[in-house]
Image: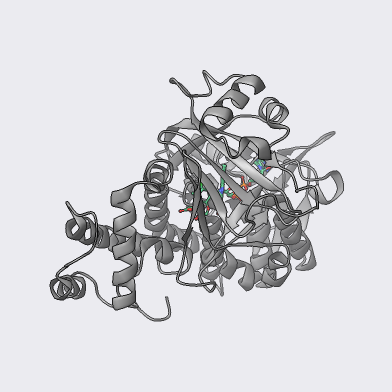
Amino acid sequence: MSAIADRHITLVGAGLAGALLATLLAQRGWTVELFERRGDPRIHGYAGGRSINLALAERGLNALRAAGVDGEVMQQAVMMRGRMVHFREGGEQLQRYGRDDSEVIWSISRGDLNIVLLNAAEAAGVDIHFDRRLERVDFDAGIAHFVGEREDIARPFRALVGCDGAGSSLRAAMHAVSDLGERIEVMPHGYKELEIPPAGDGGFRIEPNALHIWPRGDYMCIALPNDERTFTVTLFLPVEGPTSFASVRDGADAEALFARDFADALPLIPDLRRDFEANPTGMLATLYLDRWRLDGRAVLVGDAAHAMVPFHGQGMNCAFEDCVALAAHLEGDVDTAAAFAAFEAERKPNAAAIQAMALENYREMSDRVDDADFLLQRKLERLLAERHPGRFVPRYAMVSFMRLPYATAFERGQAQRALLVDATRGRSDLDDLDWDALDRRVREALSPLPTEA
Ligand code: FAD
Ligand code: E0Q
């Protein structure tokens, strides 16, 4: 241990969280070593495997601001004002995410974002080692073993941070010496990515400033815009059952599914058959842990600690918020055991809240965005939000446009939903609502939100 300087930290995984956390810590005076299993994407191209583009919202953007890379990232971002719902019978409808263009989210490329963050990490002095996969850890000796292409290396460490994603090797190594209370809930759905190329004139084939969604009950498609005028389509299907990855096996089956259920999307995806067969089928799960740390020697962040289903578009945003929180707890003259404990105490309830909201959003997205009850509740939600600014704030807005704790958004969202369900029960419109009684109920049930949130 004594061979390593004070304020030295070793990060595992140079994906989204790892590259950002490395930057934040190096900027705050830490000596940071960062190890990544894959090659340098700036040399070999991005070998992602995971989703090609992602929705960036306020929490993630705020973390990018903290690292000073927001400007560069936003240059390539495409604004998404709302969901464009494509109905089964044809026709589409834009459901705005916020009140106006100050409340929007952004589509960004995972590969480009990773490269911006790696450049920032290097500029801040981080020592990055690519093609180095963490294989095992000797916690008593304080040595981490990495496997490279040619040689293996044994690296002494003071503290390890696991930024190595849902299949975290550091988590496995920690678990081998101390039970973390791991539980994985696999979602019975998988996903497949497909591409909509640019139009003949080089422009976007469909509305660029929206997240497109084709809700179809137990399955759905979404499409997010890329700045090179393409869209990445993600087909979410059950793994088993009548319409599932078990029944839709090859490109021809996929084309038949699109002809039947996503008819307006089919002509937009010329390489549907090839994309379907060439791209892997991804799996989705929620990861719950009782503990994220091993005293002062190791801690987990991002997907390694709390992987979630992607239906709220918050996994990266939450991982980035983790990075800001951990960097803040490591500020000043702290010992890592106290910092990791405070980090876990702050973030665990919030991770659990966004995991639950992400699961809930699956049903909402696939099954409810085209349903009359739901649309009436959304309408009343908008009206109550206008009548009670800073008090009745739609849950989507609390999650996506604000930075109050996810757990607060979850709790207030539950109170608000009870109110909306009650007030719209048995109705098909909002005529003759007892607004006075409703306003009173809002004021009783919800305190004003702190303004800085
Ligand atoms: P990762 O990005 O997975 O990075 C982990 C890194 O660790 C990788 O570079 C990996 O190579 C490396 N690594 C792994 N094992 C080792 C090892 N043993 N040694 C060294 N390195 C290792 N989130 C959003 O906010 N918005 C969205 O719109 C969104 N859409 C999504 C859509 C889909 C289909 C999916 C699956 C996820 C989506 N997410 C979204 C979630 C988001 O992808 C994750 O939450 C995010 O990538 C987590 O970042 P991370 O750094 O924790 O993990
Ligand atoms: C967003 C933005 C993969 C994915 C990513 C997302 C969202 C959805 C549905 C999906 C949630 C929403 N959403 O539109 O309510 O806001 O990121 Cl499936």
x then y, percent, for residue 56: 58, 60
**Residue closest to the far front:** 90
Quarter of the image containing the C terminus?
A: bottom left
* Above-or-below relation of 145 to 126: above
Residue located 82% across and 35% down the image: 151
Camera-side residue of 344 and 442: 442
Residue located 68% across and 62% down the image: 77
Coloration mode:
one colour
Q: Is residue 228 left or right of residue 180?
A: right
Q: Is residue 130 left or right of residue 169?
A: right
Residue located 49% across and 64% down the image: 339
x then y, percent, for residue 410: 33, 58
Q: Is residue 150 left or right of residue 162?
A: right
Please tell me in which quadrant of the rendered image residue 20 appears: bottom right
Please tell me in which quadrant of the rendered image residue 375 appears: bottom left
x then y, percent, for residue 297: 55, 52
